[in-house]
Image (cartoon, rainbow, N blue to C red):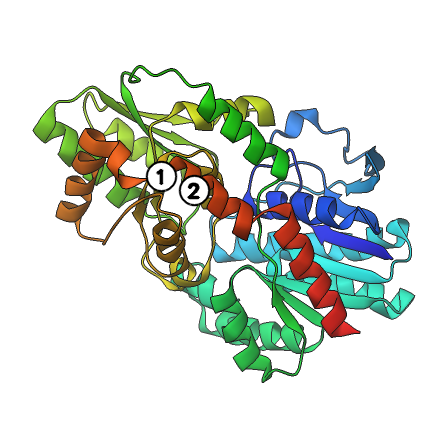
Amino acid sequence: MKILIISEYFPPDQVGASRRTKILAKVLSNNNKIKILTTSPHYPGEISKVKWYKPYSVNYNKNIEIHRFWMPIIPMNNSIGRILNYTVFSILASFFILFAGKSDIVWGTSPNVFVTIPINFHSIIYKSKRIINIDDLWPNAPIELGYLRNGILRSISKKFALISILSTDGISTISDKLKNIVNQIHKNTIPTASVYVGIEDYRLSKFRKLMNNKKTDITSPFIFMYSGKLGPAYDFRIMINGFKNWIQMDKLDTRLVIRGTGPEELGLRKLVNSIPNAPIKISSNYLEDDKYDHLLSSVNCFILPMKDNFISTTAIPTKLLEYISTGKVILGISKGEPKRIISESKSGLICDYNLENIVDTYSKIYHNSNEFHNSEFQMQYIKENFSEKIIRKQAQQLFSDMD
């Protein structure tokens, strides 16, 4: 079977949508011919061979065809920028989809609802079956995050989202909770299945090896880290203020490292610079996968500071699966699906959105980190619930339901 996957993000971009597309392509490539239609890398842009004067290229990674087209970089710091970015991608993808050719299934993974435009165009031309991925409900998430404040834009977005959901042959979601919500919207009339982001088997094996080879001495200083997109779905302010209040009380040898890029980066740098002598570092340097995995394995504790909103309830962040896979302890400021997974995987402590509680949780993990997680159980949990085998089984079930 020939499958075309469409995503604005693909490696070397290091965001959840990129990881999802890479893993999905890999697990499906064993029995199918896979093509990816994506853009020039958003980050790091300097390594891209796709330029405005040479707007299309085709590369091969084992048995996967990667079709890239040039797209201008559009800031997404407000609702107009985000909608413009998504619209430009959808229009360009609808044109360059002709270069990718015919497929039996076209699967749009990112950007969420907007990718419906090119997949419907492909279906009309090639009579292909359509799958749309939903990782957050549009426009609920952008409304909560403050991007959609205009009443007219909200109304248009809601209608567009409903049409997109109802005009497809299949739907994939990133969590069971989100799947149940989507089923309620279309009243169980469209095949819908959870197809998790997951984590690649080779990375899980690498993390296990790195964990087994770690030195027995205690790392100094003790490193807390957030690594991932610096986006509006995360409450970095309460994470930083909790850390600041804690170290002012205890005066310990510890560091907070915030690694990533995104629309919140400038505001975070201003906040950190306003705290005198704070042992907080923000890093936006790009790391290739091997160095990135070694970095993840070198820290003591990961922080997942989800905002208290709908996304926090329904999403399973890619970074959370990476955190658990390293076998390290996690400090979760979250609820819903992330809270459930941290609890089930025995990988850390969950605290609410109370600053005093967050300060207390920092202290507990620093002084007794080994008591709050189980490395072997964490890795086995990921293998049994989010491995390549699980993702492949979920995708195949969706195909079967669509037949």
Q: Secondary structure at mark 1?
A: loop
- How packed is label 2: few (under 14 Cα within 10 Å), some, or many (20 or more)? many
Residue at image position (67%, 36%) is 41
Describe the element under mark 2 as helix, strand or loop. helix
Which of these two is toward me, 126 or 72? 126
Specify whether 61 is left or right of 285.
right
Circle 1 packing at 10 Å, graded few (<14), some (14-19), many (20+), is some
- Residue at mark 1: 374
Is residue 318 something that shows in the picture?
A: no
Q: Position of residue 232 (x, y in %)?
A: 41, 50
Determine which quarter of the picture holds residue 224. Answer: top left
Residue at the spot of label 2? 378
Q: Is residue 128 visible?
A: yes
In the picture, the quarter occupied by the N terminus is: bottom right
* CB under 8 Å between discs 2 and 1: yes
Position of the C terminus, as image quadrant, is: bottom right
For the point 53% across and 81% down, the residue is 184
Q: Nearer the viewer, residue 219 or 309?
A: 219
Can you tell which mark lies on residue 201? none
